[in-house]
Image (cartoon, helix red, strand yellow):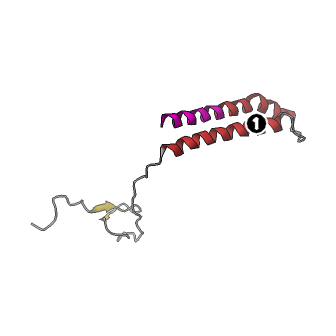
Amino acid sequence: MTGFSGDRDAGMRQCVYCGKHIRGNLRQCPHCREAQSEARGPSAAPTRAVSGGQFRSGLLLVLMSAVVQYFAGGYSSMALPPQFSSPVTTFFVPLLFVSGLGLTLYGVFLRVRA
C-alpha cells in the first residue's frame, strides 16, 4: 500500500488555462505557469433585488416612452423629419409603453409572490 486514498483524483483539479490536472492546493499551474483563481459557487441573490430590478426597469421604459412621445409627437420646439416621427409615434411608443407596463406588473407580481 502506498498511502494514497482509493480515489487518486480526490485532491486534483483541472487548470482553467491549459486543462491539465494539477493538485487542488496549488495557486499556480506548474505546466503553463498561470495563476489559478479560486472557484467560488454563485452567491444566492435575494428575490427582492430581482423583483425590484424588474419593477424599476419597467418604470424606466414607461418614462422613456413618454419622453420619446414628447419629442416625436411635436410637443417640443425641436422639429423631427415627418418620415421619422410618424412611425415612431404610431408603432414604437405604444410598444415601448406596453412592454414597460408589463415589466412593471411582472415586478409587482414577483414582489407579492416573495
- Residue extending furthest toward the top: 90
Residue in view at x 19 percent, y 58 percent? 7
The quarter holding residue 100 reads top right
Q: Is residue 48 left or right of residue 104?
A: left
For the record, the magenta segment spans 100-114
Task: Give percent across and percent down for residue 26.
Answer: 33, 69
Which one is in front, 56 or 8?
56
Alpha-carbon neighbours of circle 1 within 10 Å: few (<14), some, or many (≥20)? some
Q: Quadrant of residue 63?
A: top right
- Residue 70 in the image: above or below residue 12: above
Which residue does the image show at 82% across and 38% down from the upper left?
71
Give the side of residue 102 with respect to residue 40, left or right: right
Residue 89 position in % (x across, y down): 78, 31
User: Disc count in the image?
Assistant: 1
Residue drawn at 31 percent across, 64 percent down: 24
Residue 60 in the image, given as x and y percentages of width and height = 67, 41
Q: Which residue is mark 1?
A: 66
Which secondary structure lies at badge 1? helix
Q: Quadrant of residue 35?
A: bottom left
Single out the residue that lies furthest toward the left: 1
Q: Give amino acid for label 1.
A: Ala
Quadrant including the N terminus: bottom left
Q: Inspect the magenta stretch and tell me whether residue 107 lies in it.
A: yes
Along the viewing direction, whichever of 67 and 28 lies nearer the viewer: 67
Residue 106 x %, y %: 56, 33
Q: Is residue 112 found inside the magenta-colored segment of the image?
A: yes
Main SS of the magenta part reads helix
Above or below 6: residue 60: above
Q: Residue at x 86, y 33 (%)?
A: 82
